[in-house]
Amino acid sequence: MLHFAVAGVPRSTPRPGGTVEGLKHAHRLGITAMEIEWVQNVPKNPDRLKEIRETAGNLKMPLTVHAPYFVNLNSQDHAKLAASKMRVLTALSMAELAGARSVCVHAAFYTGMPPAQVYTNIYHATEEIMDKKKKLFPHVNLAYETMGKTAQFGTLEEVLAISKEFDIFPCIDPAHMHARTNGKVNTAAEWNEMLDTYEQYLGTKALKHMHLHFSGIAYGASGEKHHLPIQESDANWKDFLKVLKDRKIEGNLVSESPLLEEDTLLLKNTFERL
């Protein structure tokens, strides 16, 4: 099954809000999954995380997590690199407590270095992260995301290659790919090529547990500027949904539109009518 996830607590959630109430409200709206937005900091209260896990389990709503933005696994500053690895590990460990299946991570910036060297640096950092992950919280996936800015590590091939090396799977964001290529990756043929490449790297079974993002997006020569409501963008979103339907893609598709619950339901309801 392909679940359509809201990116965080729906805006219409009654007070006092929060993830638990957001899950209940999203479920009432007909939304079947959520990505928890830990983009600024990661909560560490085990009782609260247990409550999230139990609520999502009772509602049968699969969870993913977005890790903090403040990560650069290519940093040449030893203190910043250590802090980046710790942020990823903390997000993974707390996500496992919350019952999430996958954690989206913005891996790194090139900072003027050759992409091959950046890949090597990220590989070594990932090696350390995975060594701890396998021992301490083995059930949650580390998902490096395809990124929207040309200054960021995160082409499709980059995230697939490193994912294959560590037996994990990435977070694929076609909107970011669209922005990074200044308007390409916006047709059925290109999306099918994207999924073909994914399958070549990770196998056919990997298409049954994908971690996807989607939204409208504003972009320029350097790539992503900001996300947009889907119907205010140039995204051929109905064609994208048809590709997912035809290919029988499963997993979680997170709507990162500024119109949180509205565009999540737009995608879900359109997909179900196809």
Image (tube, rainbow, N blue to C red):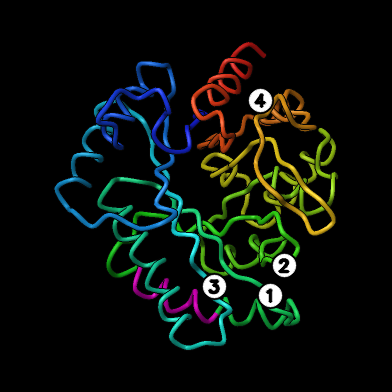
Mark 4 or 2: the one toward you: 2
Q: Along the line of sight, which residue is nearer the eye, 188 or 70?
A: 70
Q: Do the residues labelled 2 and 1 touch (CB within 8 Å)?
A: yes
- Residue 131 on the magenta span: yes
The residue segment tinted magenta is 124-133
| Image depth: mark 4 or mark 1 in front | 1
Q: Around disc 3, counting alpha carbons within 10 Å, would you say few (fewer than 14), some (14 to 19), or many (20 or more)? A: many
**Is 227 left, or right, of 183 in this rendering?**
left
- Which comes before the other along the chain, label 4 or label 1? 1
Q: Where is residue 19 in the image (x, y as percent from the top left)?
A: 31, 37
| Magenta stretch: helix, strand or loop mostly | helix
Identify the amino acid type marked 2. Ala
Instruction: Give the residue pinned by disc 2.
Output: 151
**Residue type of the residue flagged with mark 4:** Lys
Instruction: Tell me where residue 112 appears, x and y as whole percent.
Output: 74, 80
Quadrant location, the C terminus: top right
Q: How many marks?
A: 4
- Cα separation between marks 2 and 3: 12 Å
Q: Which of marks 1 and 3 is nearer the N terminus?
A: 3
Q: Which residue is found at the position 33% from the left and 29% from the top?
A: 23
Q: Which residue is identified by label 3?
A: 72
Which element carries disc 4, helix, strand or loop?
helix
Instruction: Provide the residue designation for mark 1.
Output: 110
Amino acid type at mark 1: Tyr
